[in-house]
Image (cartoon, grey):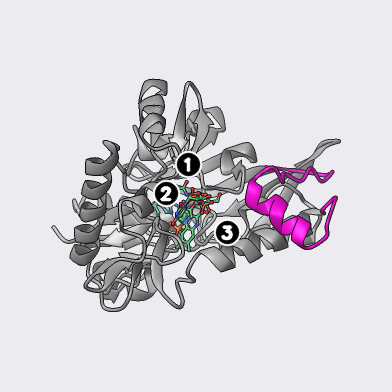
Amino acid sequence: MRFLENFPLAAFNTFGIRAKARYFAAPASEDELARLLRSVTARNLPLMVLGGGSNVIFGGDFAGLVIHPDMRGIQCLGETAEHYLIEAAAGEKWHDFVQYTLARNWFGLENLSLIPGTVGASPIQNIGAYGVEVTDRLHSLTAIEIATGCRHEFTHAQCRFGYRDSVFKQELRDRFIISRVRFRLLKTPAPRIDYGDIRQELVARHIDSPTPRQVSDAVIAIRSRKLPSPDVLGNAGSFFKNPVVGRAQLESLKADWPALVSYPQGEGAKLAAGWLIEQAGWKGRRIGPVGSYEKQALVLVNHGGATGGDVVCVAQAIQQAVRERFGVELEMEPQVYGGN
Ligand code: FAD
Ligand code: EPU
């Protein structure tokens, strides 16, 4: 397997940060990945897994080996009366995979259209949008253990999904590389259109009972209006998670801020971080090359030439402003690598 040296990562992170990897390899099969892992683990080289780079920030160069899973393929493994079991390899682009399923009348992923990145990364933070999360459709997955190169199967329950969370961000962090993901997709359409924006978009299009294709088109239109395209303006999507607060904190916040935007979550609520950031005076504001996006305060953007340090500086200023105003902590969604 070929190692590339001093490999430029600007095209491999949607924030567009110019950083380099000491080594870079793109295994195209599970066997190639296993051989690669067995050859490098003895060398004590720092490793990182990089898919499409749409949820990472490079704090500086990465002084180790970047592994970019490049396995391809989508197949139907079987069916029941109601479902198809569809398997996709880690290196497939997520949005292309969603479109591929819709073209074959395999339903259920339509709300997750236009999310950047790869199939292999989709379970890591349990990607979600417009009322659906990967956990709703994932059946099981295959991953290769970094320490041994051995293959492991994970059931849905073993992935321990939560809001923007899974076991792969917790106890099993940096221990496995996901190589294949299986989804249970529907034979009969069951569009989920409860999310406010989708309903409004469909009404505007005079559509009463949408097909999954029409839901996908609506989601694509909404997202294209709200979120900056990384090809035009570097970004990593939502920069912070929507914070979850308990009932007591919610009630006290609502007393002070009646317009607070929140969604029920267990006993408490998930707060709209974009609203908190906007109210803290940060929407559209920037320091140097990094700022909050003018149309969606929760998205940080690279106006050109940003370093990882510039990003962290703005992220910390926003966290402090929100903490001082609301007493709420914002947790970063993207992972930071390199630069130490
Ligand atoms: P990367 O950014 O390359 O990696 C993310 C993390 O996963 C890293 O820690 C990496 O080490 C790990 N990883 C990647 N691949 C693997 C693998 N095969 N095995 C093990 N670990 C791996 N997210 C949402 O949930 N909902 C959204 O609506 C959404 N919208 C977005 C919009 C924009 C414009 C952008 C730029 C991002 C958005 N995101 C959204 C975030 C991002 O697209 C997702 O988190 C996506 O799943 C990241 O995929 P990736 O391949 O780019 O992962
Ligand atoms: N809002 C503001 N000002 C802003 C932005 C938002 O007041 O500048 C308020 C509005 O009231 C708006 C509400 O916040 O109605 C929610 O905003 P939006 O619908 O844009 O969604 P979000 O909560 O900001 C989340 C996800 C997105 C996902 C969308 C759609 C997180 C951290 N983000 O964003 O995921 O696409 O919902 O489901 O949960 C990502 O994770 O990278 C991502 C883009």
Residue 261, labelled with which disc?
1
Label 2 – label 3 distance at C-alpha: 28 Å
For the residue pair 262 and 308, the one nearer the viewer reads as 262
The response on whether ligand 2 sits within 8 Å of label 2 is yes
**Which circle's residue, 3 or 1, is located before the other in the chain?**
3
The residue shown at (58%, 38%) is: 135
The response on whether ligand 1 sits within 8 Å of label 3 is yes
Q: Tell me, yes or no, whether the two marked residues, 1 and 2, touch with CB atoms within 8 Å.
A: yes
Which of the two discs, 2 and 3, sits closer to the camera?
2
Q: Is residue 82 above or below residue 195?
A: above
Q: Quick one: SS at disc 2?
A: helix
The response on whether ligand 2 sits within 8 Å of label 1 is yes
| In magenta segment, residue 189 | yes
Q: Quick one: SS at disc 3?
A: helix
The residue beneath circle 3 is 94
**Residue 133 sits in quarter:** top right
**Which circle's residue, 2 or 3, is located before the other in the chain?**
3
The residue shown at (86%, 36%) is: 81
Residue 275, labelled with which disc?
2
Q: Residues within 10 Å of mark 1 (few under 14, many from 20)?
A: some
Q: Magenta residues, as a range?
A: 184-210
**Residue 233 sits in quarter:** bottom left
Question: What is the three-letter code of the residue carrying label 2?
Answer: Trp
